[in-house]
Image (cartoon, helix red, strand yellow):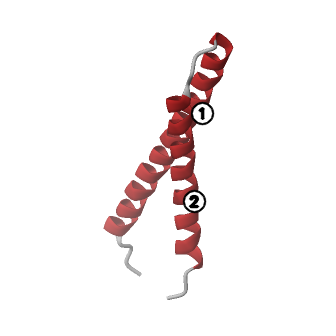
Amino acid sequence: MKIDWAAIGSVFGVSLVATVGLVALFTLGVAGLSRRERAATRGDSAALALTGAYVCFAGCAAAVAYGIYLITAKA
């Protein structure tokens, strides 16, 4: 039996980048909601922060949906 170490390394690298990217995107969404809350207590408008948070969360949902599609797709 021969192990293809290059393929394992490639899968590891892509998984690491995707995981870090998804966590960073979710963190930006939470930070946007936090900024909106702070602006609301001061009476300022934070429409841009709220829109950015929604975009980040939509990106997370799209990435998860694409992952589920890849897992369940029939070849």
Quarter of the N terminus within the rendering: bottom left
* Residue 40 position within the rendered picture, expressed as x and y whole percent measured from the top left: 65, 19
Q: Secondary structure at mark 2?
A: helix
Rendered position, 2 above or below 74? above
Mark 1 crowd level (few <14, some 14–19, many ≥20, 10 Å Cα): some
> Which residue lies at the image location 45% right of the left edge and 53% below the top edge?
18
> Which residue lies at the image location 55% right of the left edge and 86% below the top edge?
74
Q: Residue type at mark 1?
A: Val
Circle count: 2
* Dots 2, 1 in contact, CB < 8 A: no
Rendered position, 40 above or below 65? above
Whole-Å distance between the Cαs marked 2 and 1? Answer: 17 Å
Q: Earlier in the sequence, mark 2 or mark 1?
A: 1
* Residue 65 position within the rendered picture, expressed as x and y whole percent measured from the top left: 58, 64
Q: State the image quarter where residue 13 is shown.
A: bottom left
Image disc number at residue 8: none
Q: Secondary structure at mark 1?
A: helix
Rendered position, 1 above or below 40? below
Mark 2 crowd level (few <14, some 14–19, many ≥20, 10 Å Cα): few
Front residue of 25/41: it is 41
Determine which residue is flagged by label 1.
30
Residue reaching furthest left? Answer: 6
> Which residue lies at the image location 55% right of the left edge and 81% below the top edge?
73
Residue reaching furthest top? Answer: 42
Q: State the image quarter where residue 11 is shown.
A: bottom left
Q: Residue type at mark 2?
A: Val
* Residue 15 position within the rendered picture, expressed as x and y whole percent measured from the top left: 45, 56
Q: Is residue 63 left or right of residue 9?
A: right
Determine which residue is flagged by label 2.
64
